[in-house]
Image: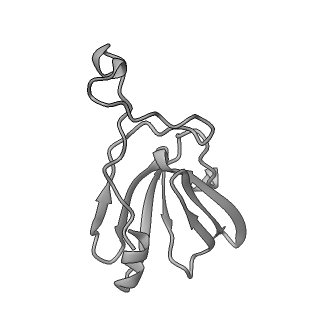
């Protein structure tokens, strides 16, 4: 989504829930538990996005700050110029250290015993 916004010539903004465990943002810029970050190439360095989170280095009030946003903290991604983007519903994300859930067939014990089912995201990264 970030790449698509940049490719369209717009500025990618991300709305972050700064109260989520593992978020690393400058606390003095958080308002009401949220912060909006500009992820454009001119605003951040070393942008890395994977299934666990978003990491980069940003500048705040003239000083560099390493940012980390676990995926669970990303509430929305949108273009500053148009407001177009995506809003995400809060979901539970597995920690990077937790084992991946096994895919149980519909007739398996896990499917018939009422065990909780882990909901996976329906989103796919498109390049």
Q: Residue at x 43, y 71 (%)?
A: 2
Instruction: Find residue 50 and report its horizontal and vertical position in percent.
Output: 53, 59
Furthest residue in direction top, as rendered = 113
Q: For residue 14, which quarter of the picture?
A: bottom left
Which is nearer the eye, 3 or 35? 3
Q: Is residue 52 above or below residue 36?
A: above
Q: For residue 58, which quarter of the picture?
A: bottom right
Q: Residue at x 29, y 69 (%)?
A: 83
Which is nearer the eye, 61 or 79? 79
Instruction: Find residue 23 and report its horizontal and vertical position in percent.
Output: 59, 47
Which is nearer the eye, 81 or 107? 107
Q: Is residue 115 above or below residue 66?
A: above
Q: Residue at x 58, y 38 (%)?
A: 21
Furthest residue in direction right, as rendered = 63
Tell how many labels. Answer: 0
Instruction: Find residue 49 and report its horizontal and vertical position in percent.
Output: 54, 63
Q: Residue at x 49, y 44 (%)?
A: 33
User: In the picture, which quadrant includes the C terminus?
Assistant: bottom left
Q: How is the image coloured?
A: one colour
Q: Is residue 65 above or below residue 52?
A: below
Instruction: Find residue 113 and report its horizontal and vertical position in percent.
Output: 32, 13
Furthest residue in direction bottom, as rendered = 9
User: In the picture, which quadrant includes the N terminus?
Assistant: bottom left
Q: For residue 26, which quarter of the picture?
A: bottom right
Q: Is residue 106 above or below residue 73?
A: above
Q: Horizontally, is 44 left or right of 118 in the view?
A: right
């Amino acid at each position: 989504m970030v790449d698509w916004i940049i490719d369209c010539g717009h500025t990618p903004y991300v709305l972050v829930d700064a109260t989520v465990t593992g978020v690393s943002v400058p606390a003095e810029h958080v308002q009401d538990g949220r912060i909006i970050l500009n992820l454009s190439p001119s605003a951040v360095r070393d942008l890395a996005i994977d299934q666990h989170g978003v990491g980069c280095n940003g500048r705040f009030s003239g000083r560099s700050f390493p940012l980390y946003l676990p995926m669970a903290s990303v509430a929305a991604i949108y273009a500053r110029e148009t407001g177009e983007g995506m809003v995400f519903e809060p979901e539970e994300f597995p920690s990077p250290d937790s084992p991946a859930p096994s895919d149980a067939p519909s007739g398996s014990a896990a499917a018939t015993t009422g065990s909780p089912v882990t909901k996976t995201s329906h989103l796919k990264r498109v390049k």
